[in-house]
Image (tube, coloured by chain):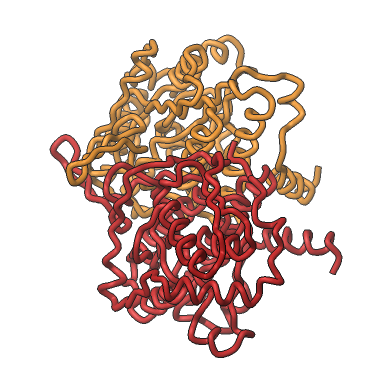
Chain colours: A red, B orange
Amino acid sequence: MSEEEKVSSVELMNMFVGTPALFWEFKPDAVVHYAEQPSAPYSMLNQEAAAFTVRNNLISTLNMAYAVREVNPSCHIVKLGTMGEYGTPDIDIEEGWLEIEHKGRKDKFLFPRQAGSLYHTTKIQDTDMLWFYMRVWGLRVTDLMQGPVYGISTDEADMDEMLLPNFHYDEIFGTVLNRFIVQAVAGYPLTVFGKGGQTRGYLNLRDTMQCVHLALTSPAEEGELRIFNQLTETFSVTQIADRIKSVGDSRGYDVQINHMETPRVEKEDHYYNPASTGLLELGLKPHYLDNEIINGFFEIAEKYSGNINRDAIFRGVSWK
Amino acid sequence: MSEEEKVSSVELMNMFVGTPALFWEFKPDAVVHYAEQPSAPYSMLNQEAAAFTVRNNLISTLNMAYAVREVNPSCHIVKLGTMGEYGTPDIDIEEGWLEIEHKGRKDKFLFPRQAGSLYHTTKIQDTDMLWFYMRVWGLRVTDLMQGPVYGISTDEADMDEMLLPNFHYDEIFGTVLNRFIVQAVAGYPLTVFGKGGQTRGYLNLRDTMQCVHLALTSPAEEGELRIFNQLTETFSVTQIADRIKSVGDSRGYDVQINHMETPRVEKEDHYYNPASTGLLELGLKPHYLDNEIINGFFEIAEKYSGNINRDAIFRGVSWK
């Protein structure tokens, strides 16, 4: 397929409005909606990439809501959300909802959100869209507000490398811990943006899979938008860099940390206290980040180190 | 132009991503963004209409943000919002922002929103999009959260009927007061949905024009998203129906009120107390709804009563 044909088939997919035949054939009881453009830097590349992100993420969600309503209205929709919908507010982050008292009256609202990229803004927008259709059509929806995922090892991947998941270590699609491991192995100074006080809720790839499975096996009610904050522990970027340097140095690397000017617009130091008890109550058994996990991760990155493309590590996509 | 060509030119406009040449030619200091699909019932017609609403309303807003950033970043964007972004919460509605105290800490957020149609959801989404680009690029933005507008008379229209604005009395694009006047003149029972306790903030077309003018002549600061609630008084649907019946009957009509089952999903009786002081402080001189205004409105509707298409009055577009 030529590059031109590829672009046009992506554009065509991006234009599709309707119910995929698969829905009619399979009549699912549950659907996991991962069909979104997932990268904040990609959404900030240029106007075309921004428009693609808006159209793809919102029309895919619209198609899914309509497909479920048409084919099986009691089908459970599990949508991937992101902790980035909340941003970094100066109050505790609750799981999706907040009761607000104002001038002596009370009501319950979606937790107020303020995204740090256009991509994250589209995730606020898809939550609002599903919330609306849930209220009108009685859909059952679980929105998993996922923090940055790290890792590559799963039970299946450990048995056969053909089952390894996609692994992104580049600036556009990679998440920070994955990127730092590869940078350490490649002898590339860790790219810490600014002060490195940016704190987020992280989780192991194994726990991500557990969370989706738990959501599917204990579905939301009809007419419920259930929101879980999907993370197991919080770290600042500096804490992660220090952990990778410590393990990397013990393996004989001389890991450098480069506090570079951030290309983003974000708080480099802030309050961060997100609730995340819902998935634990459903039975999540977290794999917390420890040196054994980091060492295992180094081993895999070392095994495939010949594949590392240093040019993909940093591009400096600017938010400005 | 054939019907088919019309559809495809709309689709093409809907696909445009970029900066219109007009921006480069004119290099505006201010831009009033009215280029959205404005109808709640249209957005609920079917999936194609929903997708059109999402793509048109969000890509037009994206194009505008990029155009302003490219051509003149200090250009003042005045976007038409809607009071429908807030929905009908059980707390007082403030002008755009709310300081929230939670577990002993405080932060300021966009007022929590919960829309009653997909169209209104896209208006929440365009506010979130402009809020994001304002924070990243320092845009200056005024978002006018407009209530339903009524009226057809302006200084210009009163001088020459060629200057009359568009007037919609149909179910899809008409707003309630305009529709009721035409229904009264056409001898069509007023279509009150359910109990009629649905309360909204209304304003006269003349005041809408004043509000846009006031926003333009006192622009927002760079890096400010300024939000005004654009309404002058609140009415329930029943109150409006009663006012139209009272004036209509005094003019010799026998106006009937039909409490029909609502085709929408909405509260038919609810708390509603929106703040709206910002535009008054800028100098707004409201034209409150009185019998003289309603009588003047009847006179215009009577003059053009031969144009009324009864079939357009009610279609029963269902939210379900």
Q: Is residue B150 above or below residue A270?
A: above
Which of the two residues, A231 or A248, is positioned nearer the viewer here? Answer: A248
Q: Is residue B80 above or below residue B297?
A: below
On screen, residue B11 versus residue A110, left or right, reads right
Q: Is residue B94 above or below residue B155?
A: below
The quarter of the picture where the C terminus of chain A appears is top right
Q: Position of residue A85 (x, y in %)?
A: 43, 51
Residue drawn at point x = 34 percent, y = 71 percent:
A222
Report the number of discs. 0
Which of the two residues, B285 or A167, is positioned nearer the viewer here? Answer: A167
Which image quadrant is residue B58 in? top right
Q: Is residue A54 above or below residue A164?
A: above
Residue drawn at point x = 76 percent, y = 49 percent:
B8
On screen, residue B21 versus residue B50, left or right, reads right
Residue drawn at point x = 76 percent, y = 21 percent:
B25
Residue drawn at point x = 53 percent, y = 51 percent:
A257
Which of the two residues, A48 or B51, is positioned nearer the viewer here? Answer: A48
On screen, residue B18 versus residue B58, left or right, reads right
The quarter of the picture where the N terminus of chain A appears is bottom right
Which of the two residues, B209 or B130, is positioned nearer the viewer here? Answer: B130
Q: Position of residue A45 (x, y in %)?
A: 66, 46
On screen, residue B179 versus residue B309, left or right, reads left
The residue sitting at the right extreme is A2
Looking at the image, can residue B37 be seen? no
Q: Position of residue A208 (x, y in %)?
A: 43, 72
The residue sitting at the left extreme is A104
Q: Position of residue A48 (x, y in %)?
A: 69, 46
Looking at the image, can residue B167 be seen? yes
